[in-house]
Amino acid sequence: MLDYPFTTEYLPPVRVVAAEGKTEGIEELLKEKPLQIGLAERGLFTVSGKASIILDFGKEYSGGVRILTHITKTPSVSVRLRFGESVAETCAELGERGACNDHSNRDFVVNLSCYSDMTFGQTGFRFLRIDFEKDAYITIKSVLCAYTHRIFPAAERFVTSDAEIQNIYATAKRTIELCCQTYVWDGIKRDRLVWIGDMHPEMLALTSLYGRMKIIEDSLDFSVSGFPVGEWMNNMPMYSAWLLIIMADYCEITGADDYVARHRAYIEGLLEQIDGCIKDDGTLDFPSYFVDWPTHEQPDELAGCRAILKIMARKMTGLCEKIGISGLYPIKMLKKLSLVPIEVKHAKQVVALKFFAEGGLGREDRELLVKGGAAGMSTFMGYYILKAIAETTSVETAVSVMKEYYGAMLKKGATTFFEDFDMAWAENSSDIDRLPKEGERDIHGDFGKYCYVGFRHSFCHGWSAGVLRFLYDYCNEA
């Protein structure tokens, strides 16, 4: 079973986005220098009075900022640091269009003192804004991204001659690897948590790259210990169903029978708990329902939950036999669930789940799945939609939709894939590496919904890397 150690790299910015006020030598911040402050430094960045700078580190990173300060006029100089996944986020005030410090501080004030070398922050960011007070006089040697990450080897099992596909692959790979911190997190700015439903595409991405992994098993163990039988995983009933789907798929993909078997009692108890919420006539009686955010409280949500439960029951019939527990509950659930058809009105992700649940689609469902190309795609459900298109229409159509959808994020400057993305957002909106022009919408601050409104929206979200599994299954030339 593979595990990967952590390291920290210190990286200078690649570009100065903006600078205001009286500053000199800002180009010095772009240079690599010894990681030690000295008494006789040359080539310094100098600030005299009120000023601000915005730096671009070129890619999304997980970590903070390391500042090597030479001289300050007073014993210390107070500066405001604002990390951002977009340039616009670095310029927002807390509370403005969702800008927040939720899960990790990304907007705060620190003191810099003479001959100091200090590291601040732990978040997800590409850009950093520093605001200096009006009485500031300070000389700085370096402002470095303190990039904290696991050391992953090159994944050599994926080969493509298509440059667009290679770019999507590399971006998805970076997305999920950045989310491999102590556990498999959803995001590195916000949602620094183990969300089990979201972890299914994350598990598919990671096992496609590296097979069996300790961090996956640690994340599952952590979640099981936090939500014993009788409770719902992450307080969401459908996430308990996703946990069982993860267990079954992880076992099938990696052969980790020994690991899954350690959770026999939990699996048996959870199957009984879920079965108790499916009535004899096939109707559902759970305390809440959730497929993904775009379908939440929408007409297709209940059909999507029915599909998730049916996928789980089918997979569990095989897993129960493999790990030596009774398959009675999955069989009962399948019989009851089959009494009510899965009828989809609008949502492509629910059509895709129906395909996974039943193994086929009728003409109307197939047409809905490809209607409008990438319109209606979901970052969380990207893998499921693309696979369903490939299996019911054509691989070529699925690849075209993938390029349209993930390519639109890349055209906006993404170096990791977003928590959510609607194709309509791409029209007349800014790139993430600059402020919006007059008449443009802000791709970050003006969009999002539910719990990810505006700048609270995560631009590096592990579930969006599920596309890696599709790439390995349908686009690998190795």
Image: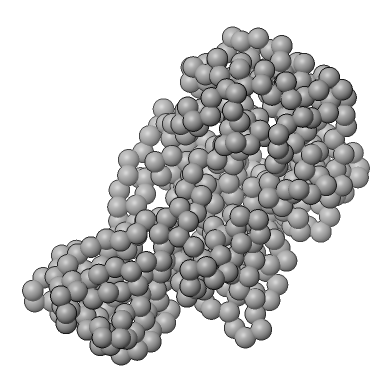
On the image, the x and y values in percent for residue 400 come to 72, 55
Q: Quadrant of the C terminus?
A: top right
User: Which image quadrant is residue 201 in?
Assistant: top right
Residue located 35% across and 89% down the image: 21
Q: Nearer the viewer, residue 12 or 449?
A: 449
User: Can you see residue 287?
Assistant: yes
Q: Nearer the viewer, residue 336 or 30?
A: 336
Does residue 36 lie above or below 159 as drawn?
below
Residue furthest toward the bottom?
Answer: 22
Percent x, y of residue 365: 87, 43
Which residue is more in the foreground, 436 or 5? 436
Side of 257 where 301 appears, left or right:
right
Q: Position of residue 122 (x, y in %)?
A: 37, 56
| Residue 142 against residue 342 in the figure, above or below | below
Q: x, y (%) of residue 216?
A: 48, 33
Specify the quadrant of the image occupied by residue 134: bottom left
Q: Furthest-left residue in view? A: 39
Q: Is residue 449 above or below residue 41?
A: above
How many dots with numbers?
A: 0
Residue appearing at x 27%, y 61% in the figure: 119
Residue in the image at 87% along x and 22% along y: 281
What kind of colouring is applied to the model shown?
A: one colour
User: Is residue 429 placed above or below 386 in the rendered structure?
Assistant: below
Tell me if I can see residue 13 in this picture.
Answer: no
291 lies left or right of 75: right
- Residue at 61 percent of width and 17 percent of height: 269
State which quarter of the image contains the N terminus: top left
